Amino acid sequence: MTDFYAAIPKAELHLHIEGTLEPEMMVALAARNKVAIPFASVEEVRAAYRFTNLQTFLDIYYAGADVLRTEEDFHDLAAAYFDRAAADGVVHAEIFFDPQTHTHRGIPFDIVARGLFAAVEGAKAKHGMTVELIMSYLRHLDEDDAFATLRQAEPWLDRFIGVGLDSSEVGHPPSKFARVFAASRERGLKLCAHAGEEGPPAYIHEALDILKVDRIDHGNRALEDPALVARLAREAMTLTVCPLSNVALRNVDTLAAHPIDRMLDLGLRATVHSDDPAYFGGYIARNFRELAAARDLSREQVVMLARNSFLGAFLSDEALAGHLTRLDTFVQAGAKAD
Ligand code: HPA
Ligand code: ZN
């Protein structure tokens, strides 16, 4: 559906490529690679997607990723995502991948990286979009494991824009990864961390003060701490909010209760993204569309969310200016049509 929400130019800044594994592809790759999965059909896979919190999701998400074995698999996964993203108005994407999910199953880092980069090149040529990759450390593992991952990534580092921090949040505060984030920063990488999704506002403070992140993923729980909200607003820190994920993982009761407009009203640089769309019911345009309907967002608020996605991206000044001009042109053309 190419409506306003799909057409408006936007950047995807919070997407886990493993979270784009649609049930159809999971079943097809299981057959292609002769991997046993505990589901007999696409319908059974879908029926299993009922989550009560982050961990119940992660258990299924990591199990599903087991069908990804070859360079071709990683290519096909990412290529399918870029096709969907382009149809959803994504002109720039900065996507996460979780190397440890694969290296811990015996899939070499290079297989993952080669497959993903082949798809990135394909997306640039086919869709004219720009794409960056962010390597995410799994926070339920220890910091030495993250350092091992950084070492495996060494030959590829100039091709990654940054590092992230994801997986089970509570009990794994950002401070656990202080040294590996410092080492990552020294190598010229941008820094992101999931914080305040399920974890307390203190984890957002740690991500800022100890990890010195450039961007916070989720960040919803900042709303419990007015001083933190004021600081995030003052520092123009981007919060990559994922509405359908928030509802699926029960961090927000319903989309109608989502605090996105409160975040904007408080001066936060909130953006809207899709997190793990194959699991949470929709890609980025659907997140925009359903959120806008549920919260009765104005066109100006939706444009602000799209604008924030470019402001929060790791773009050069020149590329940023180009995207903002393109967004303004889109908005003006729409205003004339009204
Ligand atoms: N939170 C934490 N870790 C994740 C997520 C998420 O929403 N998706 C994939 N890994
Ligand atoms: Zn996420």
Image (tube, rainbow, N blue to C red):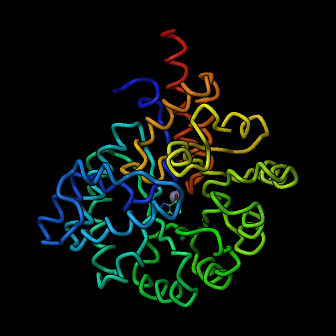
Near-viewer residue (10 or 69):
69
Near-viewer residue (81 or 251):
251
Seen in the picture, residue 52 relative to 87 is either above or below; the reply is below
Q: Is residue 121 left or right of residue 264?
A: left
Query: Residue at horizontal 47%, vertical 47%?
Result: 274
Q: Quadrant of the N terminus?
A: top left
Q: Position of residue 123 (x, y in %)?
A: 30, 52
Seen in the picture, residue 210 relative to 81 is either above or below; the reply is below
Furthest residue to the right?
227
Count the marks: how many?
0
Q: Position of residue 321 (x, y in %)?
A: 58, 42
Q: Position of residue 308 (x, y in %)?
A: 62, 42
Q: Is residue 212 left or right of residue 65?
A: right
Q: Is residue 76 left or right of residue 120?
A: left
Q: Position of residue 163 (x, y in %)?
A: 54, 71
Q: Is residue 108 left or right of residue 169?
A: left
Query: Residue at horizontal 27%, vertical 68%?
Result: 115
Seen in the picture, residue 117 relative to 94 is either above or below; the reply is below
Query: Residue at horizontal 61%, vertical 68%?
Result: 169
Query: Residue at horizontal 50%, vertical 70%?
Result: 136
Q: Quadrant of residue 18?
A: bottom left
